[in-house]
């Protein structure tokens, strides 16, 4: 017999307009995507999943130089304690942080197969191991000294940091890509040394504009190299408004062969372009007779990239040959800039270069103040305890007598020597032989 369904009580049925219900639910979804998934925080440049991975690794004591631990262990801990979403999405994020062709300054030091520039998949997380890099350690530096605020995790069992102390300009140095609802972000990587120079100038002259900072930050700095072929004006415009794009081309040179023959060798390709797809595309165009100047293409890459392109004949002009390739293939690609980040962890906003660095510097100042206050309190606490020890040391017989005879020695000690609660506790917690 099936269970008989009990009809709901008419008093418990609420009529809601479909439009209102949809609006409310879609807005809740949109906000959650913007705040907790797709946009990085302007202060530490991380999205929640990356922040949780790094904090999870911190709790596992995976500092640089320590032995590696299985990625499965890291993913499981992060998923169980902080990030109640799919294990695959956490592992994908971890892998990206370890790939030196995706991240300009990798935050994870990986051991095993973490994928490659051809777009091959990494090994499953039971086969790979990981630990933090020096850069990740810098991002977490000061987290034990009350450097940042903590909040309860999703089930209230433990705490997680709202933002990391961030002693490294991670937002611009490593960049970020993300698609939220109704807004997206795309930040290419930059050179950390240039960013620090610009930040130092900004500390001296807080009113400096983005245009001035371009003296140090010339443009993006991709882990895979490449050459940006935009005009200075359009680069400046992109950094001032926080929106724009960079035309990036592969780096090539001409190599002479025997008897006047030559080939073009490509040693750097644009960022986020998969090399194997690129070679396939060129081969396809060759078959379709769309590249009349090209004879053949070979991939001779080992550790470094080396794509060899043979011309149809010696008489071909190498510049013309490359122009035809740039036009038809991903040897030239547009990398968008959209500096859309969460300001103060709450407000999505498109910032210029100067505002981005300003947010980071303001955050560093807050962290520094919090850490200094924490240290000051530690010192004050220690001085108070030592003051109590001094009293006990100078009146040692009386202290021992009180402890032996009184039922409640603590109030008696406080009364006899005008001690504070902390001092009395410290004396009572001492071992007898140290007394």
Image (cartoon, helix red, strand yellow):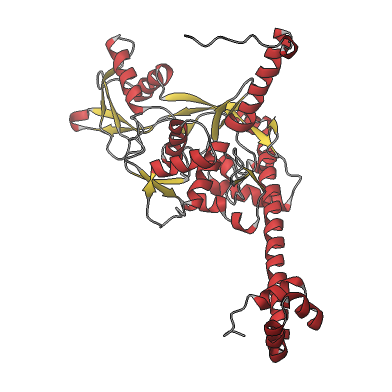
Image quadrant in which you'd find residue 282: top left
Q: Is residue 318 left or right of residue 62?
A: left
Between 37 and 185, the one lying in front of the other is: 37
Image spot of residue 38 (x, y percent): 58, 29
**Residue 231 sits above or below residue 435 on the image:** above
- For the image, the number of numbered tags is 0
**Can residue 243 be spotted in the picture?**
no
Q: Nearer the viewer, residue 255 or 420?
A: 420
Seen in the image, is 188 located left or right of residue 224? right
Question: Does 356 sit above or below residue 148?
Answer: above
Q: Is residue 400 above or below residue 281?
A: below
Looking at the picture, how far across and down is residue 390, in whole percent?
71, 85
Going 64% across and 20% down the picture, which residue do you hit? 182
User: Residue 250: percent from the left, percent from the top?
Assistant: 41, 30
* Quarter where residue 307 is shown: top left
Which residue lies at the image location 76% right of the left edge and 80% below the top edge? 413
Any part of residue 152 in sight: yes
In front of the other: 23 or 300: 23
For this view, does 303 lie left or right of residue 182? left
């Amino acid at each position: 017999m099936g269970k008989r369904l009990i009809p709901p009580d008419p008093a418990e049925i609420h009529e809601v307009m479909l439009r209102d219900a949809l609006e409310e639910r879609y807005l809740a979804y949109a906000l959650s995507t913007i705040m907790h998934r797709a946009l990085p925080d302007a202060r530490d440049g991380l999205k929640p999943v990356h922040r949780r991975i790094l904090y999870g690794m911190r709790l596992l004591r995976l500092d640089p130089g320590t032995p590696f631990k299985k990625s499965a262990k890291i993913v499981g801990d992060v998923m169980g304690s902080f990030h109640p979403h799919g294990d695959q999405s956490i592992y994908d994020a971890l892998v990206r942080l370890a790939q030196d062709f995706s991240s300009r300054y990798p935050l994870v030091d990986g051991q095993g197969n973490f994928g490659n520039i051809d777009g091959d998949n990494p090994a499953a997380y039971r086969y790979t191991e990981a630990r933090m890099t020096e850069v990740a350690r810098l991002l977490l530096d000061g987290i034990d000294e009350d450097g940042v605020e903590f909040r309860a995790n999703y089930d209230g069992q433990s705490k997680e940091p709202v933002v990391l102390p961030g002693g490294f300009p991670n937002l611009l140095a490593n960049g970020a890509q993300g698609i939220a609802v109704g807004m997206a972000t795309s930040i290419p990587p930059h050179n950390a040394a240039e960013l620090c120079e610009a930040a130092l100038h900004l500390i001296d002259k807080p009113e400096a504009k983005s245009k001035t900072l371009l003296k140090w930050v010339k443009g993006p700095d991709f882990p895979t190299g490449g050459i940006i072929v935009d005009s200075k004006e359009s680069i400046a415009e992109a950094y001032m408004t926080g929106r724009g794009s960079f035309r990036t081309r592969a780096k090539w040179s001409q190599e002479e062969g025997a008897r006047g023959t030559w080939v073009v060798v490509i040693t750097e390709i644009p960022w986020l372009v998969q090399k194997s797809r690129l070679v396939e595309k060129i081969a396809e165009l060759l078959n379709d007779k769309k590249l009349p100047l090209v004879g053949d293409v070979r991939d001779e890459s080992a550790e470094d990239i080396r794509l060899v392109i043979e011309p149809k004949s010696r008489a071909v002009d190498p510049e013309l040959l490359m122009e035809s390739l740039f036009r038809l293939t991903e040897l030239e690609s547009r990398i968008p800039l959209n500096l859309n980040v969460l300001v103060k962890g709450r407000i999505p906003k498109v910032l210029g270069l100067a505002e981005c660095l300003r947010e980071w510097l303001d955050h560093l100042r807050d962290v520094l103040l919090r850490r200094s206050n924490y240290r000051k309190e530690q010192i004050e606490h220690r001085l108070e305890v030592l003051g109590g020890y001094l009293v006990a040391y100078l009146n040692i017989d009386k202290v021992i007598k009180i402890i032996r005879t009184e039922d409640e020695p603590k109030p008696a000690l406080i009364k006899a020597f005008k001690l504070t609660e902390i001092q009395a506790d410290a004396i009572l917690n001492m071992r007898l032989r140290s007394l």
